[in-house]
Image (cartoon, grey):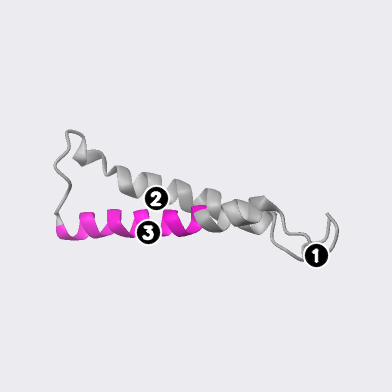
Amino acid sequence: MKSGHISIWFFIGVLLTVYGALILGYGLFELETGQTANVILADLHAPVWWGALLLALGLFYGIRFRPGRNG
């Protein structure tokens, strides 16, 4: 990668990190307050799992393709 160019994967990583943090935060709020959405499988706590997955993927892409990284 030439200097001055930023990979699109870095921005995707930032976006996934933000969405993951928001969804995970909402899922943890649901767990703390007990106010779950009225869905059939609410006891599986999908926002916690999906939020954690998105956060992990976003951090991976954000770190792997960060600007100024050698290579």
Pinpoint residue 38: horizontal percent, then vertical percent. Answer: 13, 42
Within 10 Å of disc 3 (Cα), the crowding (few <14, some 14-19, many 20+) is: some
Q: CA distance from mark 2 to mark 1?
A: 32 Å
Magenta stretch secondary structure, dominant? helix
Residue identified by numbered label 2: 51
In the image, the segment drawn in magenta is 16-33
Instruction: Pick whichever, 2 or 69, lies toward us.
Output: 2
Comes first in the chain, label 2 or label 1: 1
The part of the image, by quadrant, that contains residue 68 is bottom right
Disc 3 residue type?
A: Leu
Q: CA distance from mark 1 to mark 3?
A: 31 Å
Residue at 70% x, 55% y: name it.
65
Within 10 Å of disc 1 (Cα), the crowding (few <14, some 14-19, many 20+) is: few
Residue identified by numbered label 3: 22
**Marks 2 & 3, CB-CB < 8 Å contact:** yes
Pinpoint residue 8: horizontal percent, then vertical percent. Answer: 66, 52
Within 10 Å of disc 2 (Cα), the crowding (few <14, some 14-19, many 20+) is: many
Instruction: Pick whichever, 4 or 20, lies toward us.
Output: 4
Q: Secondary structure at mark 1?
A: loop
Quadrant the N terminus occupies = bottom right
Pinpoint residue 35: horizontal percent, then vertical percent. Answer: 14, 54
> Residue 4 shows which numbered tag?
1
Disc 1 residue type?
A: Gly
In the drawing, does residue 52 fall left or right of residue 25? Answer: right
Residue 17: within the magenta? yes
Residue at 47% x, 48% y: name it.
54
